[in-house]
Image (cartoon, grey):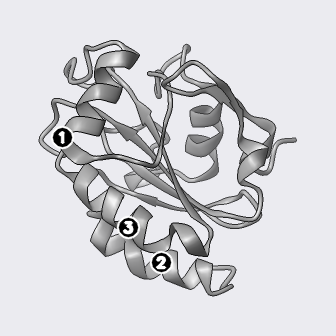
Amino acid sequence: MINNIYQFSNKSIKGENIELSQYRGKVLLIVNTASQCGFTPQYEGLEELYRKYKSEGFEILAFPSNQFANQEPGDDESIYSFCSTNYHVSFQLFSKVEVNGTSADPLYKFLKNSISGSLGSTSIKWNFTKFLINREGRPLKRYSPMTTPAFIEADVVKLLKGESSL
C-alpha cells in the first residue's frame, strides 16, 4: 500500500525523469497549474513563498494541466517560457498531466484519495488546487484554488518547525 509520495516519479517540464524520493525530508506544496486561468497570478505568491522558505527545506512542485476550460493549451516549452518570463518561477515545473479521470497521473490519484476536497469529493475542481505534504511524504492538507499562497504560509512554517500535524 502506498502511504507517501516517494514511490512516484514524474517527467519534468524539461523532459527529465524525477524521482519524488529526492524530496524526502522536505515540506512540499504540490499544485496543478494553468497559464490562462484567473488564478494564474498565484504563481507570483508561490514563487515568493518558495524563495522565502526553500533554504529551510521547502519545495513547490507544479503540475500544469489542461483539464479545466482548456486553460493550459501550450506544450511544455511554451509553459516553461510563460512561467519563467512572467513570474520568474524557479521552483520545479513538471510536464503537463491530467489530474482527473481514468488517465489521471498516478501521483494525483494518490493525492486525491489521501485527502478529499469539499463535501468529500475526491476530484480536483479547478486549477491551483494545492496539497501540503509533510517531511515524511504524506499529504496533510488540501487547499482550494481560491486559497492564496500567503494564506498557506502559516501551515508551511509549522511543518518546517517540526510540527507533524496541522
Residue depicted at x 69% and y 80%: 164
Mark 1 vs 2: CB contact within 8 A: no
Q: Position of residue 89 (x, y in %)?
A: 34, 46
Q: Nearer the viewer, mark 3 or mark 2?
A: 3
Residue type indicated by callout 1? Asn
The answer to which of marks 1 and 3 sits earlier in the sequence is 3
Residue 82 vertical position relative to residue 55 in the rendered view, above or below: above
Assess whether mark 2 and mark 3 are in contact (beta carbons under 8 angstroms). no
The residue singled out by tag 2 in the image is: 155
Q: Which mark is residue 49?
A: 3
Give me the C-alpha separation between circle 3 and circle 2: 12 Å
**What is the tally of numbered marks visible in this picture?**
3
Q: Is residue 61 left or right of residue 134?
A: left
Residue type of the residue flagged with mark 2? Asp
Point out which mark residue 69 bears. none
Q: For mark 2, does the 10 Å Cα neighbourhood hold few (<14), some (14 to 19), or many (20 or more) residues? A: some
Neighbours of disc 3 within 10 Å: few (<14), some (14-19), many (20+) = some
Look at the numbered disc 1 and give the secondary structure of its residue.
helix
Residue 146 visible in the shown view: no
| CA distance for labels 1 and 3 | 17 Å
Is 163 on the left-hand or right-hand side of 84?
right
Q: Residue 88 at x, y = what percent?
A: 28, 47
Instruction: Give above or below for 134 relative to 44.
Output: below
Between discs 1 and 2, the one toward the N terminus: 1
Q: Is residue 130 left or right of residue 73?
A: right
Residue 165: % across, % down: 64, 79
C-alpha separation, residue under disc 1 versus residue under disc 2: 27 Å
Residue that badge 1 annotates? 86
- Please name the residue shown 71% across and 31% down the image: 9
First in residue order: circle 3 vs circle 2: 3
Q: Return the x and y of residue 90 as percentages of the image width and height.
A: 41, 48
